Image: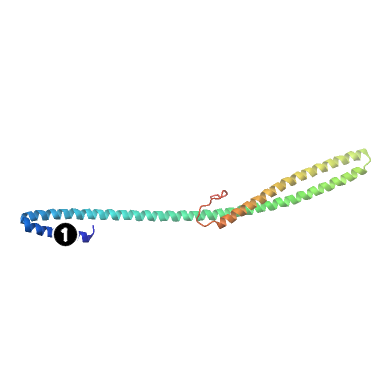
Amino acid sequence: MKPREIIILLLAAAFGAIAIVTWNGEEEAKQQTAKALAELSKTKADAEDASKQAAAALAKTKADAEAAAKQAATDLAKTKEDAIKAGAQLKADLATAKEDAAKAAKKAGELEKAKNDAAARVNELNAELAKLRDGSELKEAIAGRKKAEADLEAASAALREANVKLAAALARIAELEDENRRLREQPRGTPNTSPNYRVL
């Protein structure tokens, strides 16, 4: 209860006491005055209790708001940290994928050269076979040709495998570049919904 309301109650009690004295006599007026004062004291105590409760509720609300603000700040900081870590990890993955692609391309070039060399050797041996007349030399040439053909087949298989790895590496680079672009376009502070996102 506000002080102004308490003063008004006091004045009302005073005027009531005067009226009681005037109409009912001094003794009855005293009784009524005592009763009014008792009610006033009770009202004042109730007002003080209500004020204390309101102050306590306000303090609790303020504490809860401060705790919520701190938690929100902590969550935001963690989200930013996770986004930075995810970006760094993505860059590292992209660099690794590019390095693997370069190695696969180099290996594919080497295997392509080996394949061409083996094919050239097969052609040479075929030409020699056409000229051979002696049986022992023919058998040796045939064995050499079979070995060259086996080398050619092995080189071809290795080249096919290298091409598959190169294609996989190039696909991974495209995926990581797309993820990197999406991460750069993502507003800061929002949760990362990428299937490739990894919390460190």
Task: Determine whether, in the image, residue 111 is placed left or right of residue 173.
Answer: right
Name the residue furthest right: 133
- What is the total number of numbered labels drawn onto the structure image? 1
Residue closest to the eye, 2 or 57:
2
Task: Determine whether, in the image, residue 158 is placed left or right of residue 79.
Answer: right
- Residue 63 quadrant: bottom left
**Is residue 200 in sight in this rendering?**
no
Task: Determine whether, in the image, residue 7 is placed left or right of residue 59.
Answer: left
Residue 104 at x, y percent in the picture: 70, 50
Residue 142 at x, y percent in the picture: 87, 40
Residue 188 at x, y percent in the picture: 51, 57
Task: Determine whether, in the image, residue 18 is placed left or right of residue 78.
Answer: left
Name the residue furthest front: 23
* Quadrant where the image shows the N terminus: bottom left
For the residue carrying disc 1, how many other residues have a C-alpha within 10 Å: few (<14), some (14-19), or many (20+)? Answer: some
Say what secondary structure mark 1 lies in.
helix
Residue 25 at x, y percent in the picture: 5, 56
**Is residue 82 in sight in this rendering?**
yes
Above or below, 145 against 53 in this view is above
Q: Residue at the location (24% across, 53% down)?
A: 49
Q: Residue at the location (10% across, 58% down)?
A: 19
Q: Residue at the location (16% across, 59% down)?
A: 10
Q: Which residue is mark 1?
A: 10
Q: Residue at the location (84% across, 47% down)?
A: 121
- Residue 152 quadrant: top right
Residue closest to the eye, 118 or 12:
12
Q: Amino acid at mark 1?
A: Leu
Which colouring convention does the figure follow?
rainbow
